[in-house]
């Protein structure tokens, strides 16, 4: 073999053997390029999703074992950025909206701009699931040490979008348009006093430069069977608001409650009053609503009636008018109950996220894609849920579709499936491949629609 032929041989070998970088990221190879050239993008996506499944699961397990709280996703963001940079065709912006990552992939042909989103943060929950990669991480949250756990599946969201990015890079020459990858921090809410989440991403221009035409996202569910995709046109997830009620009484010895004004007793009466707002004062046949107190703090000793007591909770609504009415009733209920006992109550309500709306026409266009990817028998229309998602801020700016992806082991009863935000939350990883395929196919199908 002469020197010229030897040089060509090694050049071919180097190109065909482009394999793994430090993050374990496979780059496109000659076989996949040939499939793309033949024009069968769906077959390429399916083939690569099969090949990448083990890697996607590995990424998810790494993040599950190393969770980070909202606006503190430093290592997670670094891992994502390195992965996107290693793919070689994505323009990467780090520290977007504090710890987030933006990636822009330009296809080989002109066309629309499609955004794909995954959220990154974990929760202050101590894991109880017996897994070899269970989280042992601890952190301070609201002044209290807590375990940290991916108790809502955001680790799967990140891993699936990382896998989708790898596939879309492999077929970029065939893409008629641009993909914007949005890896979002602080979906669960920024710490008090900080900005964060989708709202901050929008504020910092994630949907501009390039200007996004549509956005797609999905959320894995521990209560939807693996292999299924659930959807709903219009409002699919509730608006979420955070409320704080500060009750001020008068301190006294625990043996002499008549010498003071007990804010703990007043708080208990307020909680009962809040429950009555939903059960007796809200038109639940119109839309669902929820008021829940998630934290109550008051007192330092068993025999001292404290001077104050604080409650923090969440409000979930699916109708804007009902939301306004419930806010007013919370203020009225808390202040008047406190006043009747000689105490005072100060109510603060912060709006976290609006209702998540699926765009009617875009949703209709995506249903055939979902049915092709999952099988029509596995695409299910569901009712709205009182869970919330700040994906709503993206959906308020551009036509969007948000889906639920099955993560419950087949044969499991929904009653027995541990809910999200609990120590026993569990996801069957076999459902993640469908998530990767769904993200890729929605993006490609939208780009190629006539």
Image (tube, grey):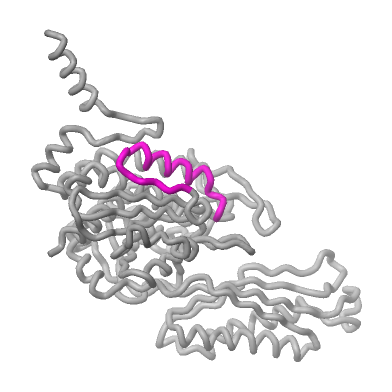
| Residue 297 falls left or right of residue 195 | right
Which residue, as the protein is rendered here, is positioned at the far left? Answer: 38
| Residue 255 falls left or right of residue 48 | right
Q: Position of residue 19 (x, y in %)?
A: 29, 29
- Which residue sits at x=20%, y=18%? 10
> For residue 89: magenta?
yes
Residue 396: tell me if it is visible. Answer: yes
Q: Position of residue 126 (x, y in %)?
A: 58, 51
Q: Position of residue 231 (x, y in %)?
A: 30, 68
Q: Quadrant of the C terminus?
A: bottom left
Q: Position of residue 399 (x, y in %)?
A: 31, 70
- Which residue sits at x=47%, y=60%? 420
Q: Over which residues does the magenta segment extend?
A: 70-94
Total marks placed: 0
Q: Nearer the viewer, residue 167 or 277?
A: 167
- Which residue sits at x=84%, y=66%? 302
Residue 128: tell me if it is visible. Answer: no
Q: Nearer the viewer, residue 20 or 46?
A: 20
| Residue 405 falls left or right of residue 78 | left
- Which residue sits at x=43%, y=68%? 393
Q: Nearer the viewer, residue 88 or 157?
A: 88
Residue 373, above or below 397: above
> For residue 281: magenta?
no
Q: Quadrant of the N terminus?
A: top left
């Amino acid at each position: 073999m002469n020197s010229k032929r030897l040089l060509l041989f090694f050049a071919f070998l180097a190109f065909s053997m482009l394999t793994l970088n430090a993050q374990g990221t496979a780059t496109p190879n000659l076989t996949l390029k040939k499939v793309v050239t033949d024009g069968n993008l769906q077959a390429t996506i399916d083939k690569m999703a099969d090949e990448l499944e083990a890697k996607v699961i590995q990424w998810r397990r790494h993040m599950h074992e190393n969770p980070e709280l909202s606006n503190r996703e430093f290592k997670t963001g670094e891992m994502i950025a390195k992965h996107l940079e290693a793919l070689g065709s994505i323009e990467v912006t780090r520290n977007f909206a504090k710890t987030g990552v933006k990636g822009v992939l330009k296809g080989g042909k002109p066309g629309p701009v499609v955004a794909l989103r995954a959220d990154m943060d974990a929760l202050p929950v101590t894991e109880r699931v017996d897994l070899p990669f269970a989280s042992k991480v601890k952190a301070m949250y609201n002044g209290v040490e807590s375990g940290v756990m991916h108790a809502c599946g955001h680790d799967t969201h990140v891993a699936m979008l990382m896998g989708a990015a790898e596939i879309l890079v492999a077929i970029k020459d065939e893409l008629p348009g641009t993909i914007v990858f949005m890896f979002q921090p602080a979906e669960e809410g920024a710490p008090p006093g900080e900005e964060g989440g989708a709202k901050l991403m929008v504020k910092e221009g994630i949907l501009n430069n390039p200007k996004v035409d549509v956005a797609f996202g999905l959320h894995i569910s521990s209560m939807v069977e693996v292999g299924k995709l659930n959807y709903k046109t219009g409002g699919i997830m509730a608006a979420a608001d955070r409320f704080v009620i500060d009750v001020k009484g008068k301190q006294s010895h625990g043996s002499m409650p008549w010498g003071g004004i007990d804010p703990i007793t007043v708080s208990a009466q307020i909680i009962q009053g809040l429950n009555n707002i939903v059960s007796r004062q809200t038109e639940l046949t119109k839309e669902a609503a929820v008021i829940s107190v998630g934290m109550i703090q008051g007192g330092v000793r068993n025999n001292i009636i404290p001077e104050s007591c604080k409650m923090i909770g969440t409000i979930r609504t699916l109708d804007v008018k009902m939301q306004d009415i419930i806010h007013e009733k919370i203020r009225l209920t808390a202040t008047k109950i406190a006043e009747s006992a000689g105490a005072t109550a100060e109510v603060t309500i912060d709006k976290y996220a609006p209702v998540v709306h699926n765009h009617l026409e875009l949703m209709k266009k995506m249903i055939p894609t979902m049915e092709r990817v999952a099988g029509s028998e596995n695409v299910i229309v569901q009712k709205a849920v009182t869970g919330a998602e700040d994906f709503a801020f993206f959906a308020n700016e551009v036509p969007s579709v948000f889906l639920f992806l099955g993560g419950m082991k087949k044969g499991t009863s929904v009653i027995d499936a541990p809910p999200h935000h609990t120590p026993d939350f569990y996801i069957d990883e076999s459902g993640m491949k469908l998530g990767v395929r769904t993200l890729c196919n929605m993006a490609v199908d939208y780009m190629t629609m006539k």
